[in-house]
Amino acid sequence: MFEKVLTKHINMPESRKIEYYEKHGGFQAWKKVLKNMEPDQVIAEVKESNLRGRGGAGFPAGMKWSFVPKTTEKPHYMLVNADESEPGTFKDRLLMDGIPHSVIEGAMIGSYAIRANTCYIYIRGEFVKEARILEQAIQEAYDKGYLGKNILGSGYDLDMYVHRGAGAYICGEETGLIESLEGKRGWPRIKPPFPAIEGVFRCPTIVNNVETLACVPYIIERGAEWFKSIGPESGPGPKLFCLSGHVKNPGVYELPMGIPLKELIYEYGGGILNDKKLKAVIPGGSSVPILTADEIDVNMDFDSLAKIGSMLGSAGVIVMDEDTDMVSALLNLIHFYRHESCGQCTPCREGTNWAEKLLKRIHSGEGTLKDVDLLEEVANNIGFRTICPLGDAAAMPIQSFLKKFRHEFEAKVKKNVA
Amino acid sequence: MKISFSESAMKEFQDILTRYPNKRAAMLPTLHLVQREFGWISREAMEYVGELLEVPFSEVYDTATFYTMFKLKPMGKYHLQVCHTLSCALRGAGHLCDHIREKLHIDNGEVTEDGKFSFVKVECLGSCGTAPVVQINDDYYEGLDTQKLDEVLDKLE
């Protein structure tokens, strides 16, 4: 029987308060780390747990930390990516709102592991309430001596600040986030150098997602073996799945990694709204390739979804019923990517613009079959030709919608065929 | 017209500066502060931020115009931001937009004549599980339909 870990205390009264968190075992991991562990031991434990990043890319967190230089000639920085803005994703908000100290404790341990003395939580600007909750929680942690100078007599110093974004999807990309934190427009950087070597203020920097860091205190406390015992070996752990769209019970569900998608939709989600038939599912946030109703016998983990040509991404599951107009749905998404393209790379800036124009034409019934082909060609020339993955994120929906629902696009332009 | 922070805002600004190794990094928090103090970010305000942070006006402008939350013209006392990205669209965000247009007689990006309300369609607000959602100033209103939206709007003074 799976026991909830990350969200166990959410919705309990006082769950935001440090006293509540401490009463239920909070900050024990932090104390253990400061007292008994060297930074490299922390990295080794997280590496051993095989915790993979929860923001979308699934990169092993311990390995990422190990790229930071062991010396501290320059200051090191820990950045918490709380910019949650991938359409269909709303799990980090729940953690920050419901149990902010778990995020803070994870960030503390991560900072210690990479020898950082400063940590910024970069939170999307719209989350005003959550930013206030985090600021309050950080103040409580300072008051208890868990942050500041010479923490609990360990000789380790750490300061933590909340930094609010101001409305830009691109700032969820780690180098866009770094640029934004430096006070500039969020234009992603060319890699290498990777942030672990040269990140914010040209110093070694790690950017980790909120949920990723929230897992860390439990790994330290219960051990890597415990973490690995949940879900598939290649990417284990408890996982937050976000369910939205045409389901009866949308929301965030904490389940073992690898839960079958069908079970998530029909058991936890209660099935399709108004008992309609399922048409399609986007399994991992709006950027990942869409699945048809026939493809939902798949486990929700990194490898299983990759095997059928999609991705776990941010685990934002968007469900669409039989009446959904797929041209309209794709137009909605491409409007998003066109709006959020930062404008730096030509294929993305121009490509998303053209894709939206073509989709509008097809949607209005004024398009032709040539427009459908051209749309595909445009997508093929955006993906993997840009500095950051926003280009790929815009191309993948177009390519997968056209592959799996092409008949709906062609039906819209049929009258113009002759 | 030259503008400047009130005493308390200036104190807040000084505190912001202590969080970063250089002044430039205080750009976003300072612009947020400007918007809170003056309601929107004018050219004069950008020049002022440039002086405070010791960066050219052009760079303040470059940053301020990149982010959608920074208002570059005065908006309504209550700023309605309606999420219209996929999960909200599937659950009726379009009806909310139509309803606002009819009720308040303003289109996307406009302000009511009395300055009380403004309306913009925005991209995903990260609240898809309680779609459709509207953010009014700092607050989220979730799981709305036209009736619930009316109730919210009618309570605003």
Image: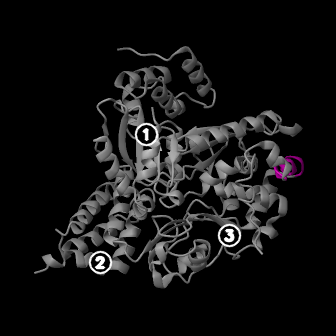
Q: Secondary structure at mark 3?
A: strand
| Residue plotted at (17% across, 73% down) | A368
Q: Amino acid at mark 2?
A: Glu
Give the percent coordinates (x, y) of residue A29: 83, 52
Disc number placed over residue A408 in the picture, else none: 2
> Is residue A380 shown above or below B50?
below
The answer to whether any part of residue A217 appears in the image is: yes
* Quadrant, the C terminus of chain A: bottom left
Task: Determine the chain carrying the residue at label 3.
Answer: A
Mark 1 vs mark 3, foreground winner is 1
Q: Secondary structure at mark 1?
A: helix
Colouring used for the render: one colour
Q: Amino acid at mark 1?
A: Asp
Give the percent coordinates (x, y) of residue A141: 77, 39
Q: Amino acid at mark 3?
A: Leu
The answer to whether any part of residue A188 appears in the image is: no
Query: On the picture, is A181 further left or further right than A394?
Result: right
* Prevailing secondary structure of the magenta residues: helix
Q: What is the crowding at mark 3: few (fewer than 14 residues within 10 Å), some, or many (at least 20)?
A: many
| Residue plotted at (24% across, 75% down) | A373
Q: Secondary structure at mark 2?
A: helix
| Cα gap from disc 1 to disc 3, whole angstroms | 40 Å
| Cα gap from disc 2 to disc 1, whole angstroms | 42 Å
The residue to which callout 1 is attached is B154
Q: Tag 3 or tag 2, which sits nearer the N-term?
A: 3
